[in-house]
Image (tube, rainbow, N blue to C red):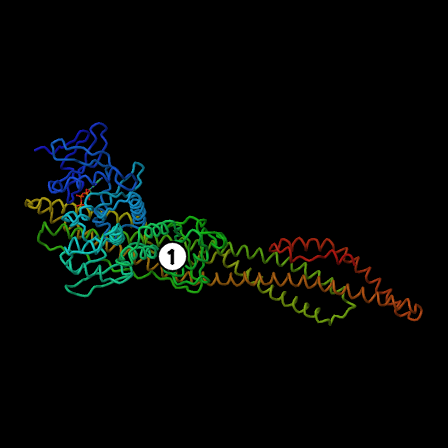
Amino acid sequence: MSFLRGSVNYVWCTTSVLGKGATGAVFQGVNKNTGESVAVKTFNPYSHMRPPEVQMREFEVLKKVNHENIVKLLAIEDDSEGRGKVIVMELCTGGSLFNILDDPENTYGLPEKEFLLVVEHLCAGMKHLRDNNIVHRDLKPGNIMKFISEDGQTVYKLTDFGAARELAENQPFASLYGTEEYLHPDLYERAVLRKSVNRSFTANVDLWSIGVTLFHVATGNLPFRPYGGRKNRETMHKITTRKTEGVISGIQTTENGPIEWSKILPAHCSLTEGLKMQITPLLAGLLENREKTWSFEIFFAEVTKILRKRLIHVFYINRLSSIEVFMEPGEQIDDFKEHLQLQTDVSPENQILLFNNEHIEGRILPEINASAFPETDTENPIFLYSKDNNNVQLPAQLELPKSPVFPSSVSVENDASLAKSACSVSHECKRRIEMLTTIDILVKKSVTQFVETLTMTMNLLLKKAQSLKELMTVVLEHYEVVTCFLKYDDHSDKEFQRLNTEIKELKTDFDRIHSLILQLHNNFVTEDQLNREWKSLMSGKKCPCRDRSSFKAKYLVERIRDSWQHLLRDRATRTLTYNDEQFHALEKIKVDRYGKQIKSLYAEDVKESVIQIADYLADWYKLAQTFYLKTQILTKDTRDCDKKLCNIREDISELMQRKKGNKQSVGALNGRKDSKNRLENLEIKKKLKIWQCEQEDLAAVLRQNNDLIAIMKGLAMSSNGNAEGALDFTSSTNL
Ligand SMILES: Nc1ncnc2c1ncn2[C@@H]1O[C@H](COP(=O)(O)OP(=O)(O)OP(=O)(O)O)[C@@H](O)[C@H]1O
């Protein structure tokens, strides 16, 4: 019997099955003229029993659509041996999402990036269908194909446009039998429970199927699961129709038992909390029925909102966890801090946020939008340290799923399934090992990051303190001059007294701060205390070497998968020879042994050492946090000193101006008296002479100090850029 079939331009082999469905089978084939690989959908006798116009519908729809996220139609040709029409499509080498989810690697759902790609492509494909007024009505993971482009990019594409219309015409729903878990409750009632429903179905029933599909892709499981599965149809219908608003899953774990409702995604789902926060409302909206049903417009708008968000990666050291913050492009740093608070409980004022060895506030100005935030990724995140909490703890890990126990006897039927479960567990171990070894790397980076930032802060602080010291010397010298100038005046003047006290206090304060800065700089920068502390804590301690642990985990997973494949082949063979049975038993032993090894690599090796590292980091952070808080206090104190010094300089200048004014008015008064009775008061004349001499002396002193004043002004300008704090001394020289 020949397995080769063909049409005018294509040939395919019936042993190269890509997939089978209710209406037929899809084979891998080639273009006879170009050699291009294609997928050929052939139809079974049942499908030929459908009315011709129904059979044509799939062809018509495929001809009408043309979009990157919809499987491309290449040709519709006749089977050369008269078995009817065949659909030739582009070949999607990645298989269907159903196959992908069926792999033990994805038992708990797809990785985050892949999940988001599915959301994006599914939404784009649906938008094209809506724009062309096409209702799919059979959306499910089996009808979403993974296409790998020539440049290695993944594109998810919708396929299978035939069956849905049959439902509208109340045809037998055989093609829907494979998909009942994804059906809108109303369709389910009619198609599966065979109840007559007096409702017309709109295109929106697709939204429910998208909700179930996305839940499945995110978690690896269906959202609504009655005890006993498909058989338990009444309960299935009860779950989907009785669920309350916001509920995204309902599971019955015992016969006739209660239904466990949930408004959140399950803990084992591998999406981060940040993404779960975005996806949960989307699922809740899609899985609303009756009055609350979403429209496609809402769905497209919500997905667009999620996809345009800016993803910022953060590593929170006190909980040793990677966090993802999704920000609206227009949101700013304060919003970022609030998002972080939601996921960490660290209030914005207690967040120390460092990136590339500096505070992000220095890099990201308050008015900058999220779209201009720096690029981050899991291994180059923004580091978050809590200012008010120096505990470091690895969050409690979920218990590993139970590993299967193989019975000693050979069971060709069951052994492959048990090996598949063992594969799932090993993949989960591998994922956790990768996560923990990444934490190990991020811990080291977080230490370096903190030390580098503090060193920079300390160096700046020391520089600032030194320039402040120079400025203070100049101001004090000027103050001396002013004091001399006022030597005949009333030194008990209240203003003068206050200034005097303030200067003394400032000097004492500043000397104390300066010496603390010197001391801290010495401990911290010169003696490199924090780095030395970290090195001494870590010396001789075991670290999970990422390359080695990950490599070993990968190796063990591959071995377990090999054995699983072997057992799968045995299951397909059904009966084994004696020798094959011996090999079969050996593969079971290997699954068991490698399974134990990878579990121990995770639990006893990598996890233990990361727990230890968390303890060392906690010890180190206690010291580092104290240093940090000290630098914060000293930075603030230095700033206060600077401010006070500026005020004092202004006060000195004001005092000078005031005294000058007083003297001028005293002179005018004396002049008037003098003109009345010149000879009457020689004492006054004498005093005026002395006064005049004094003024000339003072003018000479001030001229000599001009250079000094110029230096002081220069320093005032450079200190803190505080130009407006600089005094106008030129008026004093005009005395
Ligand atoms: N273009 C393609 N490239 C690779 N594989 C494909 C392609 N199209 C379909 N397949 C595979 O063939 C399977 C069946 O295809 P399809 O869903 O079109 O058939 P069906 O008879 O309508 O199925 P159903 O009963 O699910 O409605 C798919 O689940 C998929 O695994």
The amino acid marked with disc number 1 is Met
The quarter of the picture where the N terminus appears is top left
- SS label for mark 1: helix
Question: In the rendered image, which quarter contains the C terminus?
Answer: bottom right
Q: Position of residue 569 (x, y in %)?
A: 13, 44
Which quadrant of the structure image shows residue 14?
top left
- Name above or below for residue 386 compared with residue 53: below
Examine the image and state in which quarter residue 394 appears: bottom left
What residue does disc 1 label?
538
Nearer to me, 141 or 87:
87
Q: Residue at x 24, y 56 (%)?
A: 600
Give percent across and percent down for residue 17: 16, 39
- Callout 1: 10 Å neighbours few (<14), some, many (20+)? some
Which quarter of the picture shows residue 476?
A: bottom right
Ligand 1 located in image quadrant = top left
Q: Residue at x 72, y 53 (%)?
A: 707
Looking at the picture, tell me which residue is in the foreground, 225 or 284: 284
